Image (cartoon, grey):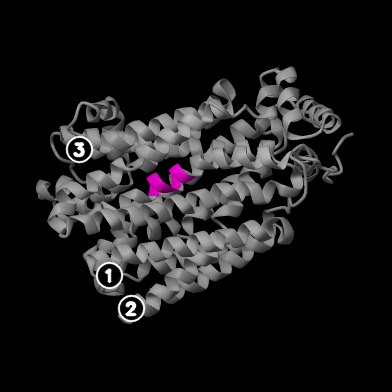
Amino acid sequence: MSQTSGQARPESTHTGLLITLTIIAALGGLLFGYDTAVISGATDSIKLNFVAPLGLAESARISLEGWTISCALAGCIIGGALGGVIAHWLGRRGGLIVAGTLFFISSLGSAWPESFIGVIGSLLTPLINLIALLLNPFGAELPHYTFGEVLTNFTGHRIFGGMGIGLASMLAPMYIAEIAPPSKRGALVTYQQIAIVSGISLVYFVNWGIASLGGDEAWRHDVGWRYMLASCAIPAGLFVLLLFFVPETPRGLMLKGKNAKALEVLNKLATGDEAKIVLKEIDDSLKESSGKLFAYGGLVLFVGIMLSLFQQFVGINAVLYYGPQMFKNMGFEANASLLQTVIMGVVMVVFTLVATATVDKWGRKPLLILGALIMAVSMIVLGFLFYSGNVGLAALVVVCIYIAGFSLSWGPVVWVLLAEIFPNNIRNKAMAIAVAAQWIANLFVSWTFNILDSHSGLTASFNHGFAYWLYGGASLVAAAFVWKYVPETKGKTLEAMHDLWHVKAK
């Protein structure tokens, strides 16, 4: 029974097991969100402890601050780029175990970079110095001793954690998509995004709670930031433990020639007859193309890369990583700024649930276009609020509307598309490229936001509003791109992607 028409077959999935496996895989998303956002509570402490003592000029100082805070993203690029190779050799499950292990080591090493665990981070010293020199946008002379031993250890562990994020960001949605039936795939892959925003929300609560324990900023800068970063070790350890109880995906097994084992897994997810049908469809799809990256033309890779780039160029991680800084610019006190990030996290979770409920009903394209338009209006209005000095509660409301727009669209739906649009025999390679591109864009946006927001000349001219206008413009372009180039994949099997892109390539 071929699915070349692209229509979904009748399904009889074992729902309980499917949801259990989805939740376990989605814990990789929770770690992704947790480790990504944990840095927001420690940005001031990192600047104070690692950068301020160097006494650098403004351009070099804000560049080094941006690098130190966002260096995990360099690891995300590496992890995303290697994800295809790791998925091939170790499988989807094996790659997620590697990701969880990296999270665990990184959380402890970055919290105590002067400890024996912290010294592990120094293994990446040559890479750290090379990346920092290549990406230093001002070409400023960096400190003579590179970054100092402890700062190098800290940066190394943040890069290790970033590698874990890069791997998890690719492999968790891939795992879920490859075990899910077509009619439920969109909703189940959004579990990954629910887990990401739950991790972000959880860490905002954790950071706020830890900051409140100390009672003053001196304690937070001395000790509190360490507890914030170390807290990731708890969910990371649980994630690795649970992964030993989940199977490899059927498609991952068949790519390794383990057809009998793939059928065994399929029999647990569906009835015996349906399992045989799916096995044949997967086998046929793997035989119908050479597996070369451009076997389906260049459009599919172009669409995947551009979706990844636009997900970052709309500015979401400038808001997530620098939330407390943004709210301080609005006039909120330090602890109040952390509380505002908690509110942001709650909004993210609520509207990601909206995406889960609608992605398989409305489709991918309508949600992406709607979300992009909401974000465009929000960012342009926010820029004008900063420019006019009319911030405070109004700006907080606009930020929450922006977060809502992202969370019901570009947050979860891009991951759904990246997990499903690539045909089976190029998915490892193509998704790795798209995910690496996403993390490159993330690093660019996160690093440059600190420059755009902190540079005295831009601040004097635009009062912190300039960056938000850029993100609003990018959101408008993103909406136009989706309307023009992105196909609707609602209800199609993964095997049907073969014909979808072959037709477009002709």
Amino acid type of the residue tagged 2 in the rendering: Val
Which quadrant: the N terminus? top right
Residue 236: x %, y % from top left: 41, 36
Q: Secondary structure at mark 2?
A: loop
Tell whether 498 sits left or right of 24: right
Q: Which residue is outermost to the front?
A: 16
Q: Secondary structure at mark 3?
A: helix
The residue labelled by disc 1 is 329
Q: Can you say whether 206 is above or below 151 in the image?
A: below
The residue labelled by disc 2 is 391
Which quadrant: the C terminus? top right
The residue sitting at 66% across, 19% down in the picture is 256
Tell whether 232 sits left or right of 489: left
Q: Nearer the viewer, residue 155 or 294?
A: 155
Label 1 environment density (alpha carbons within 10 Å; few <14, some 14–19, many ≥20)? some
Residue 269: x %, y % from top left: 73, 34
Q: Nearer the viewer, residue 13 or 175?
A: 13
| Residue 335 among those drawn in magenta | no
Mark positioned earlier in the residue sequence (3 or 2): 3
Q: Can you say whether 465 is above or below 349 in the image?
A: below
Mark positioned earlier in the residue sequence (1 or 3): 3
The residue labelled by disc 3 is 151
* Mark 2 in CB contact with mark 1 (< 8 angstroms): yes
Q: Which residues are magenta?
A: 30-36
Amino acid type of the residue tagged 3 in the rendering: Leu
